[in-house]
Image: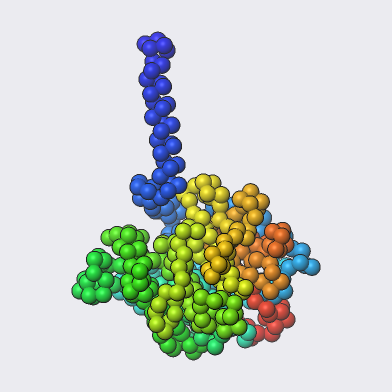
Amino acid sequence: MAFRDRLPLIVFVLSAVFLVFVGGVAFAHYGVFPAPGLTRAMDGGAALFKGPTRNQHLVPVRHPGHGVTVAQPERVAAGVTLVTSLWADLGGVAGARVLDRDGTVLATWRLDATELWEETPYTDSVAGDFHTAGNYLHGSYLFPNGDLLVNIEWFGLVRMASTGTVVWKLDRRTHHSIDRAEDGTFWISAARMVDDPQDALRRFPGLLTPFVEDLLLHVSPDGAVLDEISVLEVLWASRYQPRISQAASPGAASGTITHLNDIEPLPGALADQYPLFEAGDLLVSLRDLHMVFVVDPETREIRWMEDSLWTRQHDPDFVGDGWITVFDNNSDDWNGLLRGGSRIVRIRPHTGEFERVHPKTPTAMPFFTRIGGKVQTLPNGDLLVTEAQGARVFEVDPEGRLVWQWIKEPEPDGAFVAEVMEGTRYPYTAEQVRAWPSR
């Protein structure tokens, strides 16, 4: 057959390939079928290829170098930085470290779920294989005396002294965030499995079991549960109830409907700056509903909600003058190429004002993490940003200039690096940290 005779067939094949490509890009961009299923399949395949469950938190190396690669001492906000990740030199399990501004490790905690719990505290663990999936930290708080409060994802809350001694444990399915209230108590993200069809029918008619019911858990500094608020019950009693039915589907994401990832109480000192809210109201982030709302913990009434300005967001914070900052993952399945990467944004609920904070433009200083992420507004106005899947923590000044950057060291193979789930600046000095009792 001559080339001239083959030309229509070649044009047809090339056109079909082009249409499939364009359609795939569109499906991925808008998150419609079949993109979500393909994405989950690809993620599962990647996890299997990379090996044990803990390696689900390993990602390809994205940034060159490791340790502190940028430091402008005259501009960096004071304090030490707590980072949480998986660490090869700790046996590949989870740990937390306090870093000085030059990257010197001042303190280390090793947290192995298999050592803290001889067996899983749950017979229906959604975390998978106890001996692998439990070694994962998500949410932390560092006390002035060197105690560390931390969630071991889905297994429990642990307060550990600087010596590595366990002060107390709370056997609840805690996960994601830990936020301290001004009275010294904590609001902790938690969950329970709903697998009783009768219980589900009574409280949430139409939802098929099993599914995860996220909880706002109020905990004292000594580990006592003071209160718990069901996120699903709050939404079910509100005008946003239809959003639950839209999001729920049998077996989707292990039954996760809301994916709670942050709770923050409004401090009394800032309450006058937020006309719609009152001191003690809770700022809540639900990743899978792209929803940020403020709820009264006493009445369970939602005072304000926004779900159209960000995608799979994390870590909303009250920062004063009526503003709330949000880590907008701006997720897509193309490493941020379709939507321009992740960004830090802010909104003023009582006026409706909305601004992009960092980067000022998508190309100014791009960063991206499809999951995870954290932003902290520092006393000098700088932002400390945790790019979880970039395995780095960086600080930018109000003009968007990079003044400090720490990158986690790669795994021994040099190709992969463990996600960094949290980078938080604390107002402690290196001398204070070195004075804490150690092993």
The furthest residue to the left: 198
Residue at image coords 56%, 56%: 342
- Left/right placement of residue 419 relative to residue 210 reads right
Residue at image coords 38%, 23%: 12
Counting from the top left corner in percent of width and height, residue 270 is at 59, 80
Q: Point out the image quarter for the C terminus.
A: bottom right
Residue at image coords 30%, 67%: 211
Counting from the top left corner in percent of width and height, residue 42 is at 41, 49
Counting from the top left corner in percent of width and height, residue 328 is at 53, 60
Residue at image coords 53%, 68%: 349
> Is residue 105 in view from this perspective?
no
- Left/right placement of residue 238 relative to residue 279 reads left
> Is residue 315 in view from this perspective?
yes
- 410 up-or-down from 1: above or below: below
Q: Point out the image quarter for the N terminus.
A: top left
Q: Nearer the viewer, residue 280 or 86?
A: 280
